[in-house]
Amino acid sequence: SISVVGLGKNTGKTECLNYILNRLPAEGFTVAVSSAGIDGETLDLVTGTSKPEIFLRRGTLFATSEKHYRERRILSELIDISNRKTSLGRVVTARALSHGKSQLSGHPTTDALKRWIERALEVFGADLAIIDGALSRVSIASPAVTEGLILSTGAAISASIDNLVFKTAFMVELINLERTSVVGNNEDSIPANGIWSVDSNSNFSLLLKGGVFNSDSIHPDDVSDTKAIFISGALTDRFLNQVRSLCLDKDIEIIIRDFSKAFISHSNFSSFKKSGGRLSVLNRSKLLAVCANPVSPEGYILDSERLCSRLSSAINLPVYDIRRIRNEA
């Protein structure tokens, strides 16, 4: 399973998804596609600019709301209707019987999306499930939901190549956080909630069950033998800075479930690392590719070759301008 997520709106995520769908084998391979929000609309509701629609080939499985299923422009066979309702009705899973277009508006929660992916692969006969998501719903890109991730970035993020590269490289750094070596592979031993101290033998000791973490919540003696601190929820700048001040005399590791739990700034993360701190994850993400859109909805266009080259050097991965590749084909 794969999620295609944009660093922001209008970064070319839908073009990237269409390119992937078009390049998959036409025979003997079934793909299932859905969305974590509403995708495939012809007009951006915020900027008023036109957007590419999602094109489905015959045989593709797709999940969307009852509302958008009724508005589809494709011949299809109904396969399943969910029991739970969304704001746009129940989620319908269907198989395309012709080539055509449809807006996608799938399950709104990560748990429901994960269950749909499992059913698509195990019950509906899909070989691959793709989720069209967004980093505003960053949990969709979590390795707990999909196995791989494709990131889309672009000029809509910034008119400056330097700033765009900076922001994208920081997100890639978070996505590529290493798995912790402090905690073993036994998922059952990992606490579901709270803030915990972890010693060198992977033993967990509760530091704070809930509430607001601050410098008075935990005494320095509580972390004197601590190898790492595990936080089950979101990692914020405030938490990061307070752990740094609490553990000034020792190198400390903070463990989060996966990169989608990190809500921190580059400056605070850099300060934490310079003080000897490390940030790691229980579940490491697999970044498959990065796509870049040099065109912004405001009309300015960045140099595609320079943008892709700079990004590739910064993140040590190939970067693709899907629009340019398609035009050159």
Image: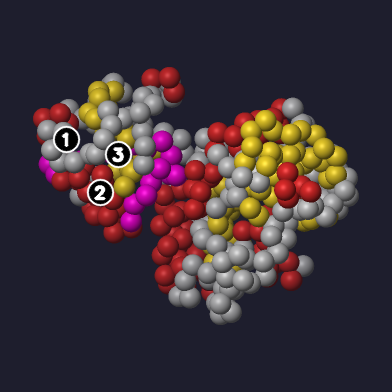
Q: From the image, tell me which residue sits under label 3.
A: 254
- Tell whether 42 sits left or right of 167: right
Tell me how far mark 2 sits from mark 1, CA to CA.
13 Å
Q: Residue at x 25, y 48 (%)?
A: 238
The nearer-to-camera label among 3 and 1 is 1
Residue at 73% of width from left, 60% of height from top? 53
Mark 1 or mark 2, which is nearer the start of the sequence?
1
Q: Position of residue 82 (x, y in %)?
A: 69, 33
Above/below status of 289 relative to 178: below
Q: Between residues 191 and 290, which one lies in front from this camera angle? A: 191
Residue 303 placement (x, y as % from top left): 56, 77
In the rendered image, the quadrant that contains the N terminus is top right
Q: Quadrant of the C terminus?
A: bottom right
Residue where numbered disc 2 is placed = 238
Asked which quadrant contains residue 255, the reply is top left
Q: Residue at x 36, y 37 (%)?
A: 233
- Residue 223 visible in this rendered orientation of the protein: yes
Expressed as whole percent of the image width and height from the top left, the position of residue 170 reads 41, 57
* Residues marked 2 and 1 touching at CB (< 8 Å): no
Task: Report the amino acid beneath label 3.
Answer: Ile
Residue neighbourhood size for the residue with mark 2, other residues' Cα within 10 Å, grouped as few (<14), some (14–19), many (≥20): some
What stretch of residues is rendered in magenta? 248-265
